[in-house]
Structure formats: C-alpha cells, structure tokens
Image: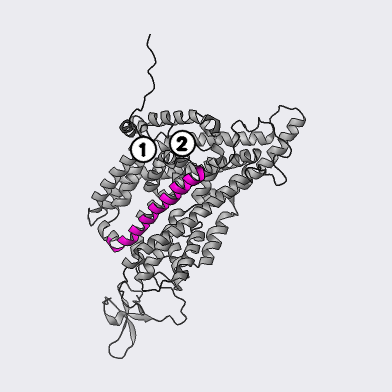
Amino acid sequence: AMQKAPPRQLKSWHTKFFFLFDQDTIIAIMSEELKKKEATTPPAAQEDIETPNLGCGILGRYPIVSVVTGAAIGVGIGIGLSYWDTDDETKSTTLKWIGLIGDLFIRCLKAVVLPLVFCNVAVSIVDMMMQGRASSVGWKTIGLYLCTTLIASIVGLISVLMFKNSFTTGIYEDQSQAFVSLGCTMEGSLLMESEVDGSVQCVADANMTSPYAHFELLDLTGSWARADGASFADLSMSDTVYSGVFLKLITDNIFFSFVDGNFASVIIFAIVFGIALGKIFFEQQLEKQHANSTQQTQAEFVVEFFTGIGEILLRMINWIIAVTPFAVCSLIANAVGSQSDLGGAFSNVGLMVLANLVGYILHFVFTDILLHWALTRKNPLSYLRFIIPAQTTALACASSAATLPVTLRCVKASKQVPDDIRTFVLPLGATINMDGSAIYFPIACIWLAILNGEDVNAASYILLIILSTIGSAGAAPVPASGLVLVITAYNTVFNSTGVPSGFEFVVAVDWFLDRCITALNVTGDTVVAHIVSCRTDWDPDFELGKTAIKEDDLGESGEGSSEEDK
C-alpha cells in the first residue's frame, strides 16, 4: 500500500531561503508556528486559509515571485518605450493598449471594493460590539494612525534636513509683467498697435511675435494668482481641512458617495450603520433569550444578508486578483513608458527624490519594524513577508483603495489578525492613514522654498509638521489633490500665493513618488491591524448570533469594554 509522503522538512538555512516564497512552504511554516502558540492564537488562525492566490499554475505556487517578476518586466518595457520618439500618436496608442489590462484590473477592483468595504465594516462593528470590543478597537486604531502619521511627519523633516544643504536656489526670469495677444473675429487676425500714432486696430495675418501685438495686463487689485508651469487650485489650509476632512467624512447622499467612490464617507456611514444594527441586534437577542425562541430575528437576517453579500463580492475579487502579475506589468509599463525624458525628470529633482526615499526607508525601519516589535513583542518580518503582494500592487496602481482587496487577502493569509479587526482597521486606514504623504509634503515644500530663495527657519519646520499630520489625512477634493496640498502647505508656511516656481519639477516625478507613498501607506495599514490585534483580548469561541449575551454586555453607550482593554 502506498504511504502518504511526509511533509517537507526545512533542515538548513539555505533550504529555508530557497523555499521562502513557496506558497506550500509558507503554509507549512505558519502551521508549525501556530501549533506552538495554539493557546494564544487569535480566532482568525483557526480558519483554513491559504496564501493569496495571484494566478494559476506556477504563478499561484509562487505568488510573491510572480508579482515581483511582473513589476520587473513592466519596468524594462517602460524604460524601452520611454526612448521611443515619434511625431504622431503611435506611441500614445501603443501605451494605451499596453495599459489596457491594468486599467481593466483597476476598474474591476474599484467596482467591487467599496460595496465589500461597506458590508465588512458594518458586520465587523456588530461583532465587536457583541464582544464588548468596539470602543477599544476604535480608539486604538485611531490613536495608532495619528501616532504613525505624526512620526512620519517628523521623519520627513529629519530626512530633508539631511539633504537641505545640498539643495540649490534656482534662477528664474522676472515674472513681474504679464502679456497677452488679443484675437479678432476674422480668423488669423490680431489686435495690433500702430507704430505711427499708437492707435489699435485688427490686422489680418498679423505676426504674433511682433511686440505691437503684445498687450500688458496690470493686476491693479492683486486678485490674480500666478502659475509657473502647470495650473492647480490654490486653496487655503482652512479650506483644505474644512472641505477635505469634514465635508469628505459626512455625506449628504450615501448613494452619490458610492457612485463618486468616496471611501471616507462610506466608511463613516458603515460605522454608524453598524452601531445602530448592533444595538438592535443586542435588543432582539435579549428578547429572543427571554422568550426561549429559536426563530431568526430581523437583525440576524440583516447581518447574515450582509455577510453573504460580502462573501459573494470576495469571491469576485479572488477572480480579479488572479491576474495581478499581468496587471502589475501592464500598469508599470504604461506609467514608465509615458515619460519622455526619465533622466531629465529625475536629474532636476534627484536630491528631493532621494530625500523622500530615505524618509520612506527610515519610517519603515523605525515604525513598521521597531515600533511594531515593541508593541507586539513578535518578529515583524514573519508577518510583513505576507504583505509583499499588496506592496507590489500598490507600487503598480498608486491607489490604496484599489490595493485594498489584495491587502485584505494578504493579512488574512498571515493568520495573525482576526477577521473583524482586519475588515475594520484596513478600510479605515486606506482613508485616513497617509504616512507616505506626511513624509512627502515637508520635503517637497522645503525643496521648493530653497529653490525659490525663501528663508526656512524653525517656525517653518514646526508648522510643516502640524500641516503634514493634519492635511495628509484629508487631501483637497480637487484633481491632483496630493500636488495641490503641497501648494497649499507651501503657501501657508511661506506666505505666498499661486504656484511656486519650479513646481513643474515636482509634477514630473510625482508619478514615481506617489507609488512609493502608496506602498508605504498600505504597509502602515497592515502594521496597525497587527498591533491592534495583538493588544486586544479576543474571544476565540465567540460566534455571532449563537453565543449567549447579557444585558450589561454593551453598557449604556452600546459599546462595552473589558477592564483589561481600559
């Protein structure tokens, strides 16, 4: 009779390293670790969960390698396309078709992720309320997100100070005068000044370069804003916080928020909806227990309905995620290939880009590794290795929202975070946790200030830390919101208006830095979820709707908490 083959044994360090990215090996290693920690393992570890399947065949067997390989191929194709110089639209058309898979991938994820977030957050709130953990988890999550964002702002300031003396002041032409040419009703005619008597008349086939066709505009009231290079909205910090934080959080039409893809308002609505549903669920469960009834309550039906919808949407997302390696290749090839002068773009702001990269690395080491270990007392690398597919996807699409399904799958595969914490903390983090942006804003502002000859002092540093911490959580609701927030912070700190000179250099490299920022933001979300999980007492035997509850479980506020959590 055939005997079952023994499980693969990892006897040496080089064997472990060789099989580091093997899906079966990851599951085997985690199973051995979980057996040793069975008494303290969170409920999510009791489930039969597999590593995120990012494809089929060899792609599914080596998910991390497949995504990284797709990214590397995309970079190679993109660099080659960036040197392609053509006068017609052949290049743009080619790039459009190369990016088709990536564009469809992002569209599919965005179509499914918001309803999934709503269902998961609402059900998670009910579950946490029934266990008396909603208040504890909520305050821990918000506190950690604020703390990590503040740390990121300080790290960004430290990083830019390391490179500050190497930044140079730019030389720009005097922009004190503004000239325009005025056209007439006849095609090709311009309004021109007579050389003889100074009269003005329309001249057919006029020479636009002639100084007599130029008219100076005088800003008598000082109400115009100047823009050197690109055009961006000029908002005050008050408008940014007012519109970008408060109005973004509270919606006046939840259906429009779904259509508009407003994550913040949908999550806030889901939290309030979940609290209301939890209260009704609690009351109806008490009535059911007093009556010794087995009939399903209305609240139980609603919870099961949203749970079922969430499972259906999750199955759809699994199908979408299967093409992640190809989508990553498509997105990166399109992004890199669309740059006509990669060398020129990075040479102008190379030190600023380097300062940002150093800041991202420092934040990752001090916050995502050292602080992570200090608050959990567990090896952070054994957890973070599961997050690599989410980080690679974030580098490809530059969207925390679009990466969220992959992030949820990666954290679930780690078997170290309960589902209720995972589905509450991660969607909230995708909305308010912007560690990468908090690093980026002070670096960009100080680089622009030195480029424009502004005086940067201690007060500027302190104000930038405050603005970066607050502003990064609520980007202005206008196109290119991250870039607009850089302008807003710069004008607030250095008392200027309009777009500063040299801002076009920041725009030229924003596509690259934005991807690094998203990857760091996603990493921070997963780290906070793990910390909250490790510092929250969770009942592994609790089952929503089947575990008996007491009248004082929720307390007066509807959100009870244990003495240990307090």
Which label's residue is closer to the chain start, 1 or 2?
Answer: 1
Residue position marked by numbered label 1 in the rendering: 64
In the image, residue 229 sits, relative to residue 529, either above or below, namely below
* Three-letter residue code for mark 2: Ser
Q: Is 523 covered by the magenta stretch?
A: no
Quarter of the figure that contains the N terminus: top left
Q: Are marks 1 and 2 in contact (CB under 8 Å)?
A: no
Q: Which residues are magenta?
A: 347-376
Tell me the residue at 55%/56% (across/down): 248
Q: Which mark is residue 459?
A: none
Report the amino acid beneath label 1: Ile
| Residue at the image point whose x is 63% and y is 47% from the top | 272
Asked whether residue 262 is in view, the answer is no
Residue 41: percent from the left, percent from the top? 53, 33
Q: Secondary structure at mark 1?
A: helix
Q: Residue under circle 2?
A: 414
